[in-house]
């Protein structure tokens, strides 16, 4: 079987998933079509969850970079469940691996955190520790989403701070303007991307630091950019001087808030100041982790001095949790307990995904495809009203003149068979899978130009 061969013979790079895709989007109805509209109406009868659904998928027929909706439309997916789909839909090797006895065993009876399967320690060690950030020694798994990873990372940071500062009152965790870290109480406090998230929900009185408003291209605006980065670091230092800060948390790219990015020196400055004043330095890699930036962890772009104390993960990892330095100890594991903190099936899934990523050199592909995309987007910006092209690898974004224009472009792209996503006030973000290659980028760019022309 090809799936077996690829999983156990690392010398054969091969991408069968791409041979089964259509060459371009195939549209049979408007989007949403009649079947999707009927499903929306049905869901509305008994649940409010329908409000978050963009469309309904046919999971069996979706393949590679193309999702198929309930009406049979093949749509190029450049959003991928907000960066959660690592190797596209129905990758043949992945499908083959999921038919193993190990997966069936965990489907039949789902092990819990306090009664794990005997294979779990080996599975965690062999699957997660090889990809641990260089500055970390241990891993802690949470219950599946990025919010839970960040929430328990906060708890660890606060516990560590209280142990070392027993007389401290109301310690806080500092995040940055336009950050998004989740929607529970601790994470909601540190989320600053949209005021809407906090309506009618109380939060802690933790402070937020300014994130530099960078102008792009960075080099052409270097003097200005360095000035605003310096000002933000000076403000952060004044906040840290209170010595009541347990941790700072930052995303390598502030995704939900508008794909905001700064220079490596800025992030290293945040790290240096955090350590200077005794605060742990947490890097939220929930969305940026697992290769889309051209490195496994986006903070690797900061160079060898990158030294986070805690790194959180979820989405493409299939499991959620955080890596941390071993001196940051969990004194009472009951305090961090959740019934399904270690999801055995998702760990097996990621083990296979990581094998496929290595065989097909998918992180290198993200770097190469991203360079092509960035260059072509720059060309398009000379003809149409997109600007501030930014990002790393295929983890890219660009701005429209205003929020209304960005919303119209996303709708126009969908009508042309491309699923795209918004972020910030007026930005389009790209979150394709790691099997998104130059030929897919060319389809995207062709549809983008067509959409921009229609709207101009």
Image (cartoon, rainbow, N blue to C red):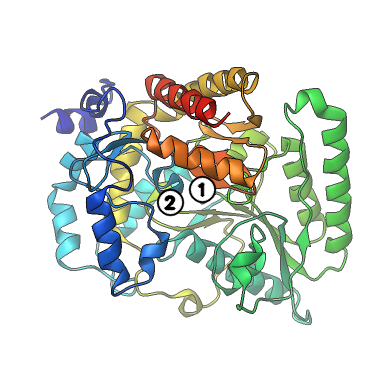
Residue holding disc 2: 315
Look at the numbered disc 1 and give the secondary structure of its residue.
loop
| Residue 348 numbered mark, or none | none
Please give the name of the residue rendered at 81% of the width and 52% of the height, measured from the top-left corner.
273
Rendered position, 213 above or below 50: above
Q: Residue at x 64, y 57 (%)?
A: 193
Q: Quadrant of the N terminus?
A: top left
The answer to whether 86 appears left or right of 118 in the picture is right
Instruction: Give the Cα separation between the discs numbered 2 and 1.
Output: 6 Å
Circle number at residue 287 = 1
Q: Residue furthest left?
A: 1
Tell me which corner region of the image, top left, top right, bottom left or bottom right, holds residue 89: top left
Residue at position x 14%, y 48% in the image: 100
User: Does residue 277 appear anywhere in the picture?
Assistant: yes
Badge 2 local density, few (<14 within 10 Å), some, or many (20+)?
Answer: many
- Pointer 1 local density, CA inside 10 Å: few below 14, some 14–19, many at least 20: many
**Lower position in the chain sequence, tag 2 or tag 1:** 1
What is the x, y in percent for residue 178? 68, 54
Q: Position of residue 35 (x, y in %)?
A: 22, 52
Query: Is 219 positioned to the left or the right of 122 in the image?
Result: right
The x and y percentages for residue 19 are 22, 23
Residue 139 position, x and y percent, is 48, 57
The C terminus - image quarter: top right
Q: Evaluate if marks 2 and 1 touch, with contact meaning CB atoms under 8 Å apart.
A: yes
Q: Nearer the viewer, residue 197 or 230?
A: 197
Q: Is residue 290 visible?
A: no
């Amino acid at each position: 079987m090809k799936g077996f061969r690829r999983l156990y013979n690392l010398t054969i790079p091969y991408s069968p998933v791409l041979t089964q895709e259509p060459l371009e989007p195939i549209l049979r109805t408007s989007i949403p079509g009649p079947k999707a509209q009927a499903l929306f109406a049905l869901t509305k009868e008994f649940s409010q969850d329908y409000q978050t659904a963009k469309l309904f998928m046919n999971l069996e027929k979706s393949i590679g970079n193309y999702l198929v909706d309930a009406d049979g439309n093949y749509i190029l997916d450049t959003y991928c469940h907000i960066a959660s789909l690592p190797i596209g839909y129905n990758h043949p090797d992945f499908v083959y691996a999921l038919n193993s006895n190990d997966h069936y065993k965990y489907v039949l009876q789902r092990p819990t955190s306090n009664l794990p399967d005997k294979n779990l320690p080996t599975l965690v060690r062999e699957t997660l520790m090889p990809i641990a950030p260089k500055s970390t020694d241990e891993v802690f798994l949470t219950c599946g989403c990025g919010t839970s990873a960040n929430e328990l990372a906060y708890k660890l940071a606060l516990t560590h701070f209280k142990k070392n500062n027993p007389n401290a009152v109301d310690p806080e965790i500092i995040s940055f303007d336009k950050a998004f870290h989740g929607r529970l109480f601790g994470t909601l406090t540190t989320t600053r991307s949209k005021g809407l998230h906090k309506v009618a929900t109380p939060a802690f009185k933790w402070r937020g630091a300014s994130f530099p408003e960078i102008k792009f291209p960075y080099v052409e605006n270097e003097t200005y950019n360095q000035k605003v980065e310096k000002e933000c670091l000076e403000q952060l230092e004044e906040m840290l001087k209170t010595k009541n800060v347990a941790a700072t948390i930052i995303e390598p790219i502030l995704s939900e808030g508008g794909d905001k990015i700064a220079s490596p020196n800025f992030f290293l400055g945040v790290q240096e100041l955090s350590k200077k004043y005794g605060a742990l330095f947490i890097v939220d890699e929930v969305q940026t982790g697992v290769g889309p930036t051209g490195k496994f962890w986006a903070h690797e772009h900061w160079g060898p001095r990158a030294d986070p104390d805690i790194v959180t993960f979820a989405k493409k990892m299939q499991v959620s949790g955080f890596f941390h330095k071993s001196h940051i100890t969990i004194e009472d594991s009951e305090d961090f307990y959740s019934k399904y903190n270690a999801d055995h099936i998702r760990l097996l899934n990621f083990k296979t995904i990581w094998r496929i990523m290595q065989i097909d050199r998918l992180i290198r592909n993200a770097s190469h495809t991203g360079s092509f995309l960035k260059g072509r987007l720059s060309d398009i910006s000379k003809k149409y009203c997109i600007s501030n092209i930014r990002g790393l690898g295929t983890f890219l974004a660009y701005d429209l003149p205003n929020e209304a224009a960005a919303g119209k472009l996303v709708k126009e792209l969908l009508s042309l068979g491309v699923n795209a996503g918004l972020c910030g006030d007026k930005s389009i973000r790209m979150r394709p899978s790691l099997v998104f290659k130059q030929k897919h980028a060319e389809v995207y760019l062709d549809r983008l130009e067509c959409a921009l022309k229609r709207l101009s």
